Amino acid sequence: MSIVTVQLGQCGNQIGFEVFDALLRDSHSFQGLCSKRENEAYQTSCKERFFSEEESGVPIARAVLVDMEPKVINQTLSKAAQSGRWKYGQHACFCQKQGSGNNWAYGYSVHGPRHEESIMNLIQKEVEKCDSFSGFFIIMSMAGGTGSGLGAFVTQNLQDQYPNSLKMNQIIWPYGTGEVIVQNYNSVLTLSHLYRSSDALLVHENDAVHKICAKLMNIKQISFSDINQVLAHQLGSVFQPTYSAESSFHYRRNPLGDLMEHLVPHPEFKMLSVRNIPHMSEDSLAYSTFTWAGLLKHLRQMLISNAKMEEGIDWQVRPPLSGLPPLGKMSLSKDLHFNTSIANLVILRGKDVQSADVEGFKDPALYTSWLEPVHAFNVWKTQRAFSKYEKSAVLVSNSQFLVKPLDMIVKKAWNMFASKAYIHQYTKCGIEEEDFLDSFTLLEQVIASYCNL
Amino acid sequence: MTQSVVVQVGQCGNQIGCCFWDLALREHAAVNQKGIYDEAISSFFRNVDTRVVGDGGSISKGKICSLKARAVLIDMEEGVVNEILQGPLRDVFDMNQLITDISGSGNNWAVGHKVFGSLYQDQLLEKLRKSAEHCDCLQCFFIIHSMGGGTGSGLGTFLLKMLEDEFPEVYRFVTSIYPSCEDDVITSPYNSILAMKELNEHADCVLPIDNQSLFDIISKIDLMVNSGKLGTTVKPKSLVTSSSGALKKCHKKPFDAMNNIVANLLLNLTSSARFEGSLNMDLNEISMNLVPFPQLHYLVSSLTPLYTLADVNIPPRRLDQMFSDAFSKDHQLLQADPKHSLYLACALMVRGNVQISDLRRNIERLKPSLQFVSWNQEGWKTSLCSIPPVGHSHSLLALANNTCVKPTFMELKERFMRLYKKKAHLHHYLQVEGMEESCFTEAVSSLSALIQEYNQLDATKNVPVQDLPRLSIAV
């Protein structure tokens, strides 16, 4: 089944390009350490999911590019075409002349309604091209104006127009110390709206990815393309084809549906994050060997101790001993010690994958009490290796990972809101103080729910 | 991509404008080697087939035929505009986009605003409408003027109200040259304060600059060049400090070097909107991020490294030095010390080969020494533009919404009061039709209110930041 990607704003379009590039490179440039037949099945499945074919044979990404000003889309289109391996559809973009000015209200209340018809038509065309349609993958940032505001508007429209299709929003959380001054307002408004209309929010934090670039990849002067490539790698390892069950013979048909089914059992809990292991520069990779036991042990500890990457993991953190009463409400004022999960999905790719032992993830102590581990934990194993990694593991987790960052954003936004700073910029586009209050209320609810796991 | 129109008013405004157009042409020539009229150039220039008579000559794509500046030149004396039209830039300006008169405003705001305002109202409107029609998507008017004189100050601010009424959706960015202490125009405090009321009410964003700061910066550059320590060679292609690539270091006109700094400011301000980069910043984002409350829209600017403003080839110093300098009081274009005052918001616009990690590292490094208002502790807006200024590898423009503008305003008010108490020169103003004493008192109270806003913010400076109680949810 196919996924239609909607790339919104500068961030969404820049990342979207890297994602498609990473997917195609993995599928076509690497042998995958498996049989030829296996590899071909993988390639076919990947292609069906993300690309459509044209007469010339060059795969065309199943994507709609939206931005309110032309520079980034032009750049993205030409970079794709230059790669020679794939490209974007000629008529798959919607562009305007003047951006949203980092104003969520402008993206949502002005650009949204004004361009609703054109954008939805484009999306419709792309959906029609799919023989069988799995759902939408929407890439956007929270801090700006177009990705955040227009993204929220489009997601809402998708919910109305395609009520039976799934929507996963890939959201980029900005650096804690300012990329945009009103980023916290934009974030609060975006998250609260998406919580109502999206099915799952897959979150990546710029700070965390930046650290991966610095510490694991050893990049000295980190650029946004470096960051986007790390992101694309993580997403690729989640979305590339996987087998449907332990001893199955074909690749999963419904990636989004399967992800949602396993990870979002309750609509109050929609925030997912990704951790992968290993991740390193190509030079280091040549000299490293891995065992599944080692990788999984680290990944489990990353989950438990809320580590963002495989370096600097706090090994002191342990799950509560089973049989004892739970540790009680998570306190935001102290350091988070133990990360409770609602649901986890581990995807393993590579050599000897069938021998990998994931028992450690089935420990009931890791999970909240209202789901049995057998429902809360799933593992997908695939022989075909991903990218250049002989063995790789990725964890998609619905857990307390994001509570602290979310709380921080709400806190800063609330402090600013109390002084009414910048509010006039939003009210002049139709977003009133009550809308802000509604958003704050919803997010406080989400924070409280996650804290009480 | 959007377009902007530059409205240059008065002697100062037109001289700076002239430098701006010169630099803009050079920048585009350096970036656009193939001579194709693209969206970046169209932000400030029209492409015109000069063989076509009248209005139909605009060409929107393809090779550059003849570039015309999107500008309106206004002056109530002919001298300056005539000089421009006889100079090397004469072909860049559209003859239809000028408004001149003969007698000048006599350094009198009232003459500029009331007399010439009403006299030329229709013509002004017509020229502005014409320039807007030539734009596909007009985003911003850049007004350049001085505060101390009569035309720039009076007629320039008359324009603001007109622009607000006629083009409410288009931003009004005003570059205002404030009079220094030793300004030789005696009535400059009157003119400035009367103008400030208009700026308070009708401008979206004001970049106040004063001549003393510009002069100090030029002296610093000359010192760097003359000291010989850094091994200087004159660069043939960089943005020059005198308008005709001359090798001599003395400047043809006294204000040339200073005007070039302001011209550079405007170029850098718009670079991220015109050129590509990994983190773009459009003009509407400047207003959105840097203006937390409508009245507080005065932004102090600084351009670093200094040598990007000069004609010289100094080996680039450490990147981090560029960031440190941006916050020092010696590099501000206004006599102000932002480091020791309170920041409401700060924007860093970087050009050239600088990546996000360099930006982050420097923000982390400099943050502890800067004071931000309690509700905007992380008040940074950043942008990265890939195209550096001509002849250099990188540059930084810092825009600060900071209470350090307060002393400038207070001092201006004091100079005003010294004159006003004695009613000195007041009759020149009051004899103009439409002027009354109330104009003066209203202007002063408008300024006093603004100063009071800054005072209130300053009072919060050293108060420890406390998180406000959050909404409590029944679980």
Image: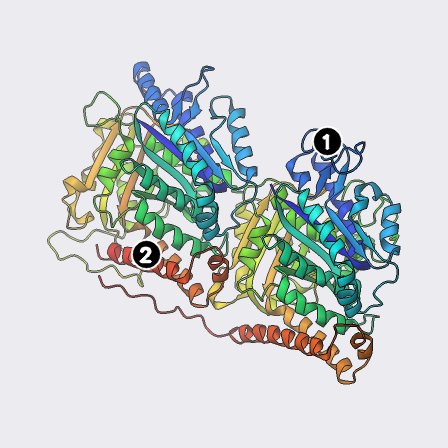
Residue drawn at (53%, 60%) of the image: B367
**Lateral position of residue B349 relative to residue B74, left or right:** left
Residue drawn at (67%, 72%) of the image: B409
Residue drawn at (49%, 59%) of the image: B378
Total tally of numbered discs in the picture: 2
Location of residue B210 with respect to A177 vertically, above or below: below
The N terminus of chain A sits in image quarter:
top left
Do the numbered discs 1 and 2 sit on residues whose CB atoms are within 8 Å? no
- Residue B359 can be seen in this image: yes
Residue on which disc 2 sits: A443
Q: What's the CA distance linking mark 1 and mark 2?
A: 52 Å
Check the residue under mark 1 and report the chain it is in: B
**Lateral position of residue A269 relative to residue B55, left or right:** left
Q: Secondary structure at mark 1?
A: loop
Residue on which disc 1 sits: B35
Rendered image quadrant of residue A412: bottom left
Which residue ends up furthest to the left in the rendered image?
A323
Q: Secondary structure at mark 2?
A: helix
The C terminus of chain A sits in image quarter:
bottom left
Q: How is the image coloured?
A: rainbow
